[in-house]
Amino acid sequence: KKQLGVLRAVPFDVQNSSEVEIADSEIKSSAGAIEIGQSSNINITNNKIHNSSTGVSASNSTYVSIIGNLITANSGGGIRIWNVGNTGIYHNTIVYNTGSSPTVDISGMDNLQGSFSQNIVAFNTGAGVVREANSTNFSTISYNDVFSNYGGQYNYAGMTDPTGINGNISADPLINFNEGSSYCLYSVSPAIY
């Protein structure tokens, strides 16, 4: 597995690869922070991904895990998934991304397995979680807090809103956004289970 330090200004492009880990890095000011294509067993863990076009984009791949990342202030959306099997998106904070693109965009997943659990998707100018017409839902959508995306109008689009089912909520996550903060939750946050 490959582990990286701090990436700035240059996107991380994983193509035709396997067993790659991108961990504990700060990735910013790039066209697309992390782009994955035709790859397998990719782990993106505990990164701060910000001020890029798209935070994480994955296509035509399998076994992609996106876990514990802060994905913020990207102009083209937070996560885009196209035709990726066995995707796991867990414990991410996906906030304050701008632009009209969906914050979490799922497409091309026809009968491919995937889980979207214990994420915070809030205060993004695009719709929160979008399933495009040509794809099926994640097999598991649970314990997420999806709140106030696209002016509060579209937390979920292209799917039945799972709020109130399987632990999914839509409430202000009460994130500490003070300058220099690590975007941690206040102790009274409804997103703490």
Image: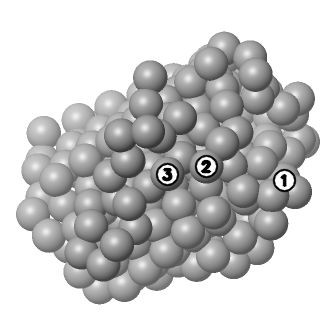
User: Up-down: is 135 above or below 147?
Assistant: above
List the residue tagged with mark 3: 174
Give the quadrant of the N terminus: top left
Please name whichever residue, 79 or 179, is drawn nearer the observer in this view of the structure. 179
CB within 8 Å, label 1 to label 3: no
Residue at 67%, 31% (x, y): give it.
169
Amino acid type at circle 2 is Asp
* Element marked by disc 1: loop
Comparing marks 2 and 1, which lies closer to the viewer?
2
List the residue tagged with mark 2: 172
Give the quadrant of the C terminus: top left
Residue at 14%, 70% (x, y): give it.
6
List the residue tagged with mark 1: 154
Residue at 77%, 48% (x, y): give it.
155
Report the Cα–Cα distance between label 2 and label 3: 5 Å
Amino acid type at circle 3 is Leu
Report the Cα–Cα distance between label 1 and label 3: 20 Å
Residue at 58%, 32% (x, y): give it.
144
CB within 8 Å, label 2 to label 3: yes
Q: Mark 1 or mark 2, which is nearer the start of the sequence?
A: 1
Q: Which mark is residue 104?
A: none
